[in-house]
Image (spheres, rainbow, N blue to C red):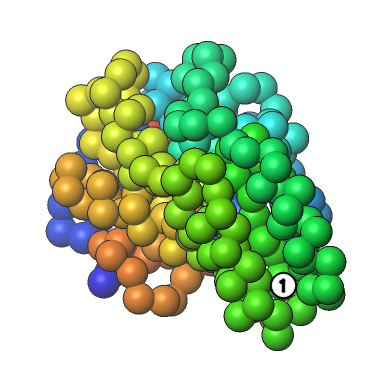
Amino acid sequence: MVKIDAIDIGTRRLDWAEWALFLDIDGTLLDLAPTPDVVVVPAGLPQRLQSLSDRLSGAVALISGRSLESIDDLFPGGCDAAGTHGAEWRRSGRVEIVGEQWPAELTWWVKGESRHLSGLLLEEKPCSLAFHFAANPTIESAVRTLALTAAALSPIPLKLVGGKNVFELVPAGIDKGQAIERFLGIPPYAGRIPVFIGDDLTDEDGFRTINRLGGLSAHVGSRDTSARYRLGSPEEVRQWLTRLDILIGAPS
């Protein structure tokens, strides 16, 4: 795997202005934090994303495990985005919920069964339930068992996805790859070269979709991945986006 570079991607010279850019948030655009609510958005990053969107005719979307509401708390303005791993989808301000309605009774059951798990943080989203255990990694096995039990009891089909110190129950059939492919079926994304940057296990579906479609996939970090290119850290991602913004805007 080679490191991604804004001037040359591997051995291929590409027209950057013809890209469709898809970006994960936590661990990709933003440095990870102990809990999702204490992440820091670096000064100038929202403006950088808007500049890239303007240069790419609007073909920039955030693809995140966060809910759309949480995305908007970080990046106000109702940008194109897929939230909750693709269960929520927004284009030009229009929001759609993909999949079945989340069973509220299941959340209440999990809350009751998890009271003894010290350090567990339950994050309720419109279409999923996340189990954060960064505060106490020793409970990982117990949390996974609880989540799997909840999935088995659910009145709707759910799947368990894992990440960095988190498990999450999401509707079956939902993933980031499907969300990206849905964007690519409509303007201004259609017909462009898709580029996706992510860091976590839940981004692998996106990488595989991008690879299948002949786009450019980049993993942030050092673990094994199906992505074809690599960036070292969120700071490196932000620097890369700055260089890309300058390149696209430069006179030809």
Q: Horizontal and vertical percent for residue 48?
A: 58, 36
- Is there any visible trace of residue 160 in the rendered image? yes
Q: Residue at x 17, y 48 (%)?
A: 212
Residue situated furthest bottom in the rendering: 138
Q: Horizontal and vertical percent for residue 147?
A: 59, 63
Q: Which amino acid type is marked by label 1?
A: Ala
Of 55 and 103, nearer the camera is: 103
Q: Horizontal and vertical percent for residue 199?
A: 47, 61
Query: Which residue has dot 1 on it?
Result: 134
| Secondary structure under the numbered disc 1 in the rendered image | loop
Q: Residue at x 76, y 79 (%)?
A: 136
Of 155 and 219, nearer the camera is: 155
Snapshot quadrant of residue 32: bottom right
Residue 227 lies left or right of residue 119; in this view the side is: left
Q: Residue at x 59, y 58 (%)?
A: 150
In what quadrant of the picture does the N terminus appear? Answer: bottom left
In what quadrant of the picture does the C terminus appear? Answer: top left
Q: Residue at x 70, y 85 (%)?
A: 138
Position above or below: 232 against 12: below
Position above or below: 239 against 34: above
Snapshot quadrant of residue 227: bottom left
Q: Horizontal and vertical percent for residue 90?
A: 51, 23
- Is there any visible trace of residue 247 in the rendered image? no
